[in-house]
Image (cartoon, helix red, strand yellow):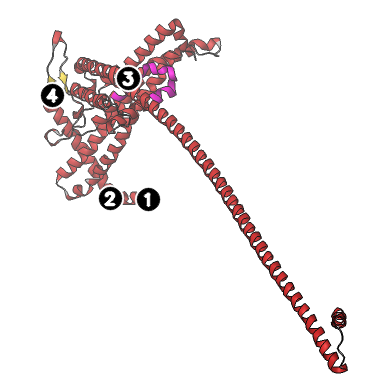
Amino acid sequence: MPVRFSGFVGQRWPVAVASFATLLAGAAQAAQEAHGLSGEKMAFPPFDPAHFASNLFWLAISFGALYWLMSKIALPRLGSILEERAETIGRDLDQAAEMQAKAEDMAQAYEKSVAEARKNAQGIAQTARETGAKASEAQRHTTEAELAAKLAKAEATIAKTKDKAMSNVRDLGSDIAVAIVTKLTGQAPSATEATEAVDQVLAQG
Amino acid sequence: MAAGGGIDPIHQFHINPIVELKPFGLDLSFTNTSLWMVIVLAVVSAIMVYGSSQRAVVPGRLQSLAEMAYEFVASTMTGVMGKEGLKFFPFVFSLFMFVLASNLLGLIPGSFTVTSQIIVTAALALLVISIVLIYGVVKHGTHFFGLFVPSGVPGWLLPFMVLIEVVSFLSRPVSLSLRLFGNMLAGHIALKVFGGFVVVLLGSGAALNYAIAPLPLLLAVALTALEVLVAALQAYVFAILTCVYLNDALHPGH
């Protein structure tokens, strides 16, 4: 960047210097003419003591007024505004912290109640499960007992029927034995003898 | 500005009476300087007094500006002088705002720069030094003049050192007022000179001069930016040096 700039100036600098010189001369002459025309104020205006009194007088008035306005109105007011703001912010922060603590407490309480409810629910479910199991167990027992009773009854009936059938078989056997012996020997054995013989066979097999 | 086609960079510092006031043979006329002092007063008051009138917890634009100025000066003062320096707060604040507003308003084309009058800056600097002297003597008595006696200096060198310290103290109002006055004066003359070049070049009628006319214009634009910086910086320098000098009145021991 500096290189480019010097290059740009470098091409025309003699012209620029010439113009600058004529310019300065022109300006100086114009200034001289202006002063010559006005005639009076040859002194450099900031150093002209003719205006010192007026400047000091109005400076005293304006700076005095500024000091009064600042020290009596603006600065105390701004000070109180800033203080108030700091207080408000502090108070709001305290309030926020308080509310946060409250919210955290509430969250904890909520979690506690949820945990309790869960525990209760688990207990209830456990009890229900146990009750159900017990009830079904009992029913099973009753049914089993009923079935066993029915089975026993049926078995007893079967045994009774079997006994009856067996005694019929015995009677029938002795009758058949009497008939066979009668047919074979032509002699009828006594009923007692036949029965004894049949019993013997039955006892064997 | 340009009287009869010529460019006079000094013309902007001329004082012209607006209302003639001459009681008891004293010329207390209301001049353009006075007018711009009153305008400075009005602008600063508008920002600070009207700006703070809402007393809003959440500030608007003007109130933010006023609060920024308040806190800037307050933090500068506590930085240099500590908390007890804040007893001079209204004074330093008024001084800073007056100088800052004068410098900045003076940059408006066609306006008048109050701080380009050496009598104004000298009066303000003398006011600062008077407060330092009066407060120092009232608060610390003769102990205040210990300011001129540096400690740890061999006896034969002491008179010489005291002399240097006294001269340094006496040169404070001079440097304080000349620094501000010189910066404002030189800046405005430079601006006017470069602005005048543009006018003269365009008025000359030569084609070449038309071609190079934008160069001083660019410089004038760049200088204006620089002058805004200088205006704010010089107000800050004035305020912070005031704080440093007031600090001597608060704590005169070396």
Secondary structure under the numbered disc 4 in the rendered image:
loop
Q: Nearer the viewer, residue A201 or B94?
A: A201
Mark 4 or mark 2, which is nearer the start of the sequence?
A: 2
Residue that badge 4 annotates = A39
Quadrant (top left, top right, bottom left, bottom right) of the N terminus of chain B: top left
- How far apart are labels 3 and 1 at the CA level? 56 Å
Residue that badge 3 annotates = A76
- How far apart are labels 2 and 4 at the CA level? 40 Å
Percent coordinates x, y for residue A85 in the rendering: 36, 27
Q: Are marks 2 and 4 on the same chain?
A: yes
| Disc number for residue B155 | none
Quarter of the figure with residue A74? top left
Q: Which residues are magenta?
A: B74-97
Secondary structure under the numbered disc 3 in the rendered image:
helix
Classify mark 4: residues with Cα within 10 Å, few (<14), some (14-19) or many (20+).
few
> Mark 3 falls within which chain?
A
Mark 3 or mark 2, which is nearer the start of the sequence?
A: 2
Q: Nearer the viewer, residue B25 or A142?
A: A142
- How far apart are labels 2 and 3 at the CA level? 61 Å
Secondary structure under the numbered disc 1 in the rendered image:
helix
> Mark 2 falls within which chain?
A
- How far apart are labels 3 and 4 at the CA level? 51 Å
Classify mark 1: residues with Cα within 10 Å, few (<14), some (14-19) or many (20+).
few
Above or below residue A177? Residue B228 is: above
